[in-house]
Amino acid sequence: MINLLVVGTIAYDSIETPFGKAADVLGGSALYFANAASFFADVGVVASVGQDFDLSEIAFLKDRNVDVMGISVDEGRTFRWEGRYGYDLNQAITLKTELNVIEQFRPKVPDDYLDADFVFLANIDPELQSHVIDQTKRDATIVLDTMNFWIENKLPALMDVIKRVDMIVVNESEIREITGEYSLVKGAKRLMEMGPHYIIVKRGEYGVLMAAQDELFLTPAYPLEDVFDPTGAGDTFAGGFMGYLANIGDVSPETIKQAIVMGSVMASFNVEDFGINRIKRLAYNEIRERYTAFKRCIHFSDIELR
Ligand code: AMP
């Protein structure tokens, strides 16, 4: 039985960073997410790929206990994204988005996934995200991600879905674009007025800011010597974050803070190699070691003020 459902894209990405380039590599928001979350939870994926997609490329997900029954092979070509990063690795520049099969996609949540307590609406058309909420159980914890493409092309549908979710995970340029507020704290307040209780703002190498009604929480990103490819860092963060929540099974503020740290640990691995490669070969022991190193970086003994 799965306890964490994700709907999003499975893609062929063409990526250029200052350190290399690759064409038609496996990617997509749902794939990055599931790959990371599978270390902590039983994940089910709802996504659409085209007839050009080579299913053997995602066979490794089954070894990770990811349920792929919800992936449909549909008529047309697989979703494609082309992006470039300059030396500011925090900001992806989208060169091309080809929706392809996503244009006709109507996600159907398999019966086996309907009891999932945790649902991640990864980056995809907000109309499809709403259609998934219609099918999930009432008390599920629903977390939303999006991207400038949808903010610019489907804002009314995005606003409708924001009202229906418990938490939002967005990056800092996206929250500014959605709310029109430069201040992340004010932007988070605007989003909370619409319904969600937790707003999690991803700030690339500067870490994460979480805002809730009565709290603010911050973590830096793990300071790596080399960052190779930031593609999918946001989805990998979300995979570690929600995988941890689903594993612990609660959404108390303290668990949410721990989940943010675990998401940050997972994202730190993702950027060390192209595409999904690093998380694909990741071992659980490495997660433990990086968590310990991460904790050491942000821990200090209490200061006694007179
Ligand atoms: P991230 O770097 O975590 O924001 O996500 C990168 C992944 O998002 C890539 O693998 C892309 O295939 C996927 N992606 C890019 N644009 C979109 C879009 N408009 N909708 C859904 N997924 C997208």
Image (tube, rainbow, N blue to C red):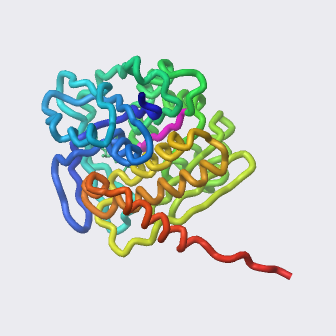
Horizontal side of residue 86 vs 153, given as left or right: left
Identified at 33% across, 72% down, the residue is 226
Q: Which range is magenta?
A: 142-148
x, y percentage for residue 2?
Answer: 42, 31
The number of callouts visible is: 0
The C terminus lies in quadrant = bottom right
Residue sitting nearer the eye, 139 or 60? 60
- Write down the quadrant of residue 81 in the picture: top left
- Write down the quadrant of residue 132 in the picture: top left
The N terminus lies in quadrant = top left
User: Is 178 included in the stretch rendered in magenta?
Assistant: no
x, y percentage for residue 250?
Answer: 61, 40
| Residue projecting furthest to the bottom | 306
User: Measured along the vertical axis of the image, is residue 287 above or below residue 241?
Assistant: below
User: Is 146 included in the stretch rendered in magenta?
Assistant: yes
Identified at 47% across, 41% down, the residue is 145
Residue sitting nearer the eye, 59 or 129? 59
